[in-house]
Amino acid sequence: MKNKKLINSFKYAFKGIISALLSERNMKIHVNIMALVIIFGLILNISVGEWFVCIICFAIVISAEMFNTAFEQMVDIAMPEKDPRAKFVKDVAAGGVLVMAIASLVIGLIIFVPKGLFFLESIL
């Protein structure tokens, strides 16, 4: 019985990931950027440590976007009418995603700009 509950919890979690990916525009943007980072990471041969950092950034940004989506849905259910408090909750949650995305961008620039410049110098 416990194994079935565990299997179901994983099934529901994967369903949640897929639902967020299919329904949320920003989630699609994050996943596309993640794919580009993976492609450039392979081309530029980033180190194992740099891959770890990128993977952590992927997980944090995607998770933040999913939490934001969940907050927005909960707020819409709890307060279907417009309310400044509901707007505040949604705006703060979206701001949290933006903070993580900007931090990940800066980390990506620190990793990829020097390698990209070296790559360009080597082919020119």
Image (cartoon, helix red, strand yellow):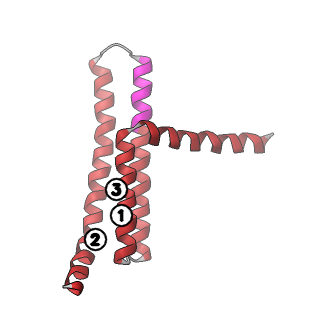
Residue located beneath label 2 in the image: 112
Name which residue type carries label 3: Ile
Q: Which residue occupies 43% across, 18% down?
A: 78
SS at circle 1 = helix
Relative to the observer, which residue lies in front, 83 or 65? Answer: 65
Residue 53, position as x, y percentages in the image: 39, 66
Q: Which residue shows up at 81% across the image and 39% down it?
A: 1
- Determine the residue positioned at 39% across, 29% down: 72
Where is residue 98? Give x, y as percent.
Answer: 28, 45
User: Which quadrant holds the C terminus?
Assistant: bottom left
Q: Is residue 18 magenta?
A: no
Task: Indicate which disc, 3 or 2, sits on the residue closer to the N terminus.
Answer: 3
User: Quick one: label 1, few (<14), some, or many (20+) residues within 10 Å?
Assistant: some
The relative height of residue 89 versus residue 5 in the rendered view (above or below) is above
Question: Which of 45 and 67 lies nearest the eye of the viewer?
Answer: 45
The label number, if any, that marks residue 37 in the structure image: 1
